Image (cartoon, helix red, strand yellow):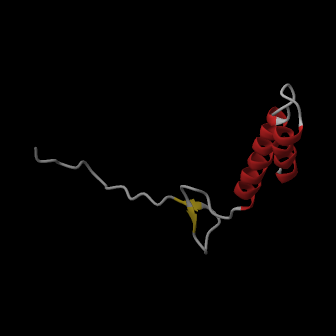
């Protein structure tokens, strides 16, 4: 990713007016692809989900939400 950005920066300094920034699309595509792969890899290796936690004695997800039993009366 760094090399593609460096090559793109060098086109601004050393290439003619028609080739300046010619690697911008390539550099952006490489950056987006590598960051997406990084995020997916981090998500895959995470032990705990975003909205759930795991109990040490059970292997099933436990919701962090607490529910009340019965209807709740509100005073307006």
Residue at horizontal 81 percent and vertical 44 percent from the top: 9
Residue 14 versus residue 49: which sits nearer the camera? 14
Relative image position of residue 45 (x, y in whole percent): 74, 61
Q: Is residue 69 left or right of residue 50?
A: left
Q: Residue at x 83, y 42 (%)?
A: 13
Nearer to me, 7 or 62? 7
For this orientation, the residue located farthest to the top is 18
Residue 54: name its quadrant: bottom right
| Picture coordinates of residue 21, whole percent (x, y) | 81, 34
Residue at 62 percent of width and 69 percent of height = 58
From this view, report whether residue 16 is shown above or below residue 52: above
Residue 11 x, y percent position in the rendering = 86, 39
Q: Is residue 63 left or right of residue 39?
A: left
The spot of residue 1 in percent (x, y) is 83, 50
50 in relation to 10, above or below = below
Q: Nearer the viewer, residue 75 or 3?
A: 3
Q: Residue reaching furthest bottom?
A: 57
Who's the residue at 50% across and 58% down the image? 63
Image quadrant containing the C terminus: top left
Image-based side of 39 in relation to 29, left or right: left
């Amino acid at each position: 990713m760094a090399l593609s950005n460096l090559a793109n920066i060098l086109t601004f300094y050393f290439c003619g007016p028609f080739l300046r920034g010619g690697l911008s699309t390539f550099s952006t595509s490489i950056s987006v692809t590598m960051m997406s792969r990084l995020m997916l890899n981090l998500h895959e290796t995470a032990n705990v989900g975003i909205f759930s936690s795991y109990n040490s004695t059970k292997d099933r997800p436990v919701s962090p939400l607490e529910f009340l039993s019965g209807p709740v009366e509100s005073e307006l």
